Amino acid sequence: MKDHDHVVTEHWYESEVLPGVRTQNADWAKAIKWADEQQPVIYEILTQNRSKVLGGASNFFLGGQKSVVYVRDAQGNKCREIDCDAVLSRLCQVYNTLTDPIRQIREAPFDIFRWRIEFTLAHYHHKGFRGGYFQQYDEKYLRNSLDLDYTAETLPLVLQRFRDWAEIYHKTDHIMIDKARVDLDGEEEL
């Protein structure tokens, strides 16, 4: 019998902004590099709950894990933990949505899903940033709905983008944001 050591070398790509977000997949590493170098705010967005579009509890990632989980410590206190694997999964989904050339062609001239990511990245630190659940109604029924982020100043633009997307199939009578009716210029109706 021979007795010898066998050394295995593994190559990992890890975020310098949020250590623990790491992979051995070179394609996924592109998303980490993009986030670290061009959009480090994405890590804050993915691990906080201010954004309805991309936040830790958002529904953008259908079938995906929540990037923030709450567990109980030994004393029974609720503690917040970041799931780095879920952050990586969500990060890759965001990166692919923004960079996929096929999607850019297929969704031309306007891709609401790409636009809302770009909007969140651009406005996340602006005063009054928040997210809401937008619902389009025609004269009779609820037709389309989508989580979108906005500020008071950007609400008219966000409403217009939502209408551009929603009115492909149905004319808009009114829009509700988090169960509050707003007029089509962005003012809350009483």
Image: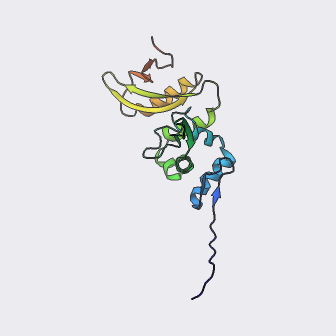
* Outermost bottom residue: 1
**Position of residue 28 measured from the top left corner of the image (x, y, whole percent):** 57, 56
Vertical relation: 35 (above or below) 177: below
The answer to whether 141 appears left or right of 134 in the picture is: left
Residue 187 versus residue 39: which sits nearer the camera?
Answer: 39
Q: Quadrant of the C terminus?
A: top left
Looking at the image, residue 3 sits to the left or right of residue 148; the answer is right
* Residue at 64%, 28% in the rendered image: 126
Quarter where residue 124 is shown = top right
Q: Residue furthest top?
A: 190
**Which residue is at a point 64% across and 75% down the rendered structure image?**
7
Residue 105 image point, x, y percent: 49, 49
Where residue 1 sits, quadrant-wise, is bottom right
Residue located farthest toward the left when viewing the structure as drawn: 140
Q: Nearer the viewer, residue 111 or 16?
A: 16
Q: Is residue 92 left or right of residue 177?
A: right
Q: Where is residue 123? Give x, y as percent.
A: 62, 32
182 or 56: which is nearer to us?
Answer: 56
User: Which residue is drawn at the image coordinates 49% and 40% (left, top)?
Assistant: 113
The residue under the point 64% across, 70% down is: 9
Q: Is residue 181 visible?
A: yes
Measured as percent of width and height from the top left, residue 23 is found at 59, 58
According to the image, what is the colour scheme of the structure? rainbow
Mark count: 0
Q: Is residue 110 visible?
A: no
